[in-house]
Image (cartoon, rainbow, N blue to C red):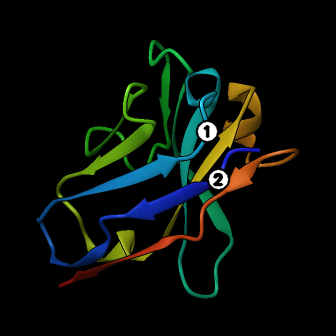
């Protein structure tokens, strides 16, 4: 499995932007599909966005379409989540996920690697 470390979270005002990063260990990063999930207090962990190993295919949750963009740099073993037009409903711990199969990442189940999470707080 690949080890994942998220960064870039913090406190931002509504309407602001943040960019999250997820650094992966190992030399096989480019063979993994990657994704972002989030979990708000008292709620289940929800899918946010996913990207194929090549970066050619991306998927976004309806709640973030047009505001969040997932991307990756295989040379840097890093996946990003650019978050714009943030609102208080985006407040959550954001987790990075990796798996060989894009469908597994999107589903958030199965043999999947997770990071430790990074807190994003959006104030009104």
Q: Residues within 10 Å of mark 1 (few under 14, many from 20)?
A: few
Inter-mark Cα distance, 1 to 2: 8 Å
Whichever of labels 1 and 2 marks the residue nearer the N terminus, that label is 2
Res 3 label:
2
Residue at which label 1 appears = 26
Q: Residues within 10 Å of mark 2 (few under 14, many from 20)?
A: some
Residue at the spot x=38%, y=25% of the render? 75
State the residue lying farthest toward the right: 110
Q: Position of residue 40 (x, y in %)?
A: 53, 78
Work out which quarter of the rendered image holds the N terminus and state it.
top right
Residue at the spot x=64%, y=78% of the render? 43
Say above or below: 108 vs 123.
Answer: above
Q: Position of residue 98 (x, y in %)?
A: 65, 42
Foreground pick, 6 / 89: 6
Work out which quarter of the rendered image holds the C terminus and state it.
bottom left
- Residue 42: quarter of image: bottom right
Q: Position of residue 5 (x, y in %)?
A: 51, 60
Tell me if label 1 and label 2 are in contact, CB under 8 Å. Answer: yes
Foreground pick, 76 / 80: 76
Between label 1 and label 2, give the one nearer the viewer: 1
Mark 1 falls on what kind of element? loop
Left-right relation of 40 to 15: right
- Residue 105: quarter of image: top right
Say above or below: 16 vs 12.
Answer: above
Residue at the spot x=68%, y=27% of the render? 102
Res 51 label:
none
Say above or below: 18 vs 39.
Answer: above
Tell how many labels: 2
Mark 2 falls on what kind of element? loop
Q: Position of residue 30 (x, y in %)?
A: 55, 23
């Amino acid at each position: 499995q690949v080890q994942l470390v998220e960064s870039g979270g913090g406190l931002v005002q509504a309407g602001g932007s943040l960019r999250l990063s997820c650094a992966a260990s190992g030399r096989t990063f480019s063979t993994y599909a990657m994704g972002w999930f989030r979990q708000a207090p008292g709620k289940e962990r929800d899918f946010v966005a996913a990207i194929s190993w090549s970066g050619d295919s991306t998927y976004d949750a309806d709640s973030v379409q047009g505001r969040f963009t997932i991307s990756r740099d295989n040379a840097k073993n890093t996946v990003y989540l650019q978050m714009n037009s943030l609102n208080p409903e985006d407040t959550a711990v954001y987790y990075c996920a990796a798996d060989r199969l894009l469908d597994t990442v999107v589903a958030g189940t199965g043999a999947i690697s997770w990071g430790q999470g990074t807190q994003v707080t959006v104030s009104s």
